[in-house]
Amino acid sequence: MRLIYLSVFLGFLLVSKGWAQDVYYEPGQTHIPGTYDFLLKNGTTIRGQFVRRDSASYLIRTKKDGDQLLSVNSIIRADLVGGTLRSGPDFPNGFPFRLFVMPTAYMPEKKSLYFQSSYVLFSRLDVGFTKNFSMGTTFQTLNPSNFHTFSAKYGVKVTPRMQAALNIQYIGIRLNERLLTKLGLAQGIVTVGDAERNITVGAGVTFSQRGIASSGVMTIGYVRKLTPDLTFINQNNILIGEAIEPQFTYLAGLSSAGLRFNRRRHAFDTALLLPIYSSNGLIRTSPLPYLSYQVRIGK
């Protein structure tokens, strides 16, 4: 069953990769209605909606400067970034370094502090120390001793559209008054695309002192901007080869899909979590709602 589950998500990765390819706007081809980022040869990017074209130029409509005529020869590429152009605000995905509960290979901005609250019960802080290094912590808001994590991430830009990172995390979970389970997570992550449309693939391992929760971990994430202020996010985690006796209940994977409502310095996430777990040899799931608020503190 676990092999089937893994195959489904690997198939999803291949389909998502096809969806995430850049949509190019080229002469002689049917265009897709929507808003595009036009990258020009002089290095500037103009966001606008296609109006009409001829053999030599494109007429686009922008919110800031109205209609503009662009020469075909001046355009390097045009990427579809959202729906139709509108008069409302256009906010980027201000938290590209995070899916819902797992990181991407993007880094938090240097000298910026980020705060996230999930269900109000859990809080997280991320700090960007340099453009390549950040640290973070998650804790139960009212009693951090019951649940807390500490993480460090080092990332580099491999190409203009590819980021790679190593994320190391310590996790402490109190099961009862006397027992505090300590886990570790080390994961390599690669993100391909840009902040508003990308695919993330991660592979790593969890480990503990007694090995009772050791397993391989695979992460597959997909991000796509739908409108100027709305981003779709899909996150899938698969645990492989758990060192746990079959009669115990254990988590085998976690799938989630939802929306991020972007604002200038903060965002609201709402999603449906689908944990996949095994109990007495049977695969089960229990859908859970997910809500979080995050804000950037600093420049």
Image (cartoon, rainbow, N blue to C red):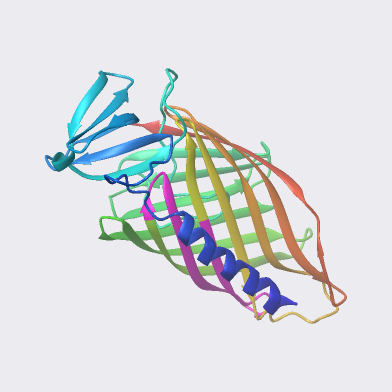
**How far across and how far down the image is residue 295, in percent?**
48, 33
Can residue 94 be seen from the camera position used here? no
Picture layout, residue 77 above or below residue 279: above
Figure quadrant of the N terminus = bottom right
**How far across and how far down the image is residue 181, in percent?**
68, 66
**How far across and how far down the image is residue 115, in percent?**
50, 38
Picture layout, residue 96 above or below residue 87: below
Q: Quadrant of residue 259?
A: top right
Q: Quadrant of residue 33?
A: top left
**Residue shown at 47%/50% (left/top)?**
136
Q: Tally the numbered discs.
A: 0
Taking depth in this image into account, of 145 and 36 the one nearest to the observer is: 36
**Residue shown at 29%/19% (left/top)?**
64
Q: In the shown orientation, is residue 126 left or right of residue 61?
A: right
Q: In the shown orientation, is residue 258 left or right of residue 189?
A: right
The residue at the far left in this view is 42
Q: Quadrant of residue 46?
A: top left
**Range covered by the magenta-colored residues:** 193-221
Residue 169 within the segment the image draws in magenta? no
Taking depth in this image into account, of 31 and 251 the one nearest to the observer is: 31
* Secondary structure mostly taken by the magenta-highlighted segment of the chain: strand
Residue 203 within the segment the image draws in magenta? yes
Taking depth in this image into account, of 43 and 123 the one nearest to the observer is: 43
Picture layout, residue 266 above or below residue 167: above
**Residue shown at 69%/81% (left/top)?**
243
Figure quadrant of the C terminus = top left
Q: In the shown orientation, is residue 156 left or right of residue 240?
A: left
**How far across and how far down the image is residue 271, in percent?**
65, 43
Can residue 218 be seen from the camera position used here? yes
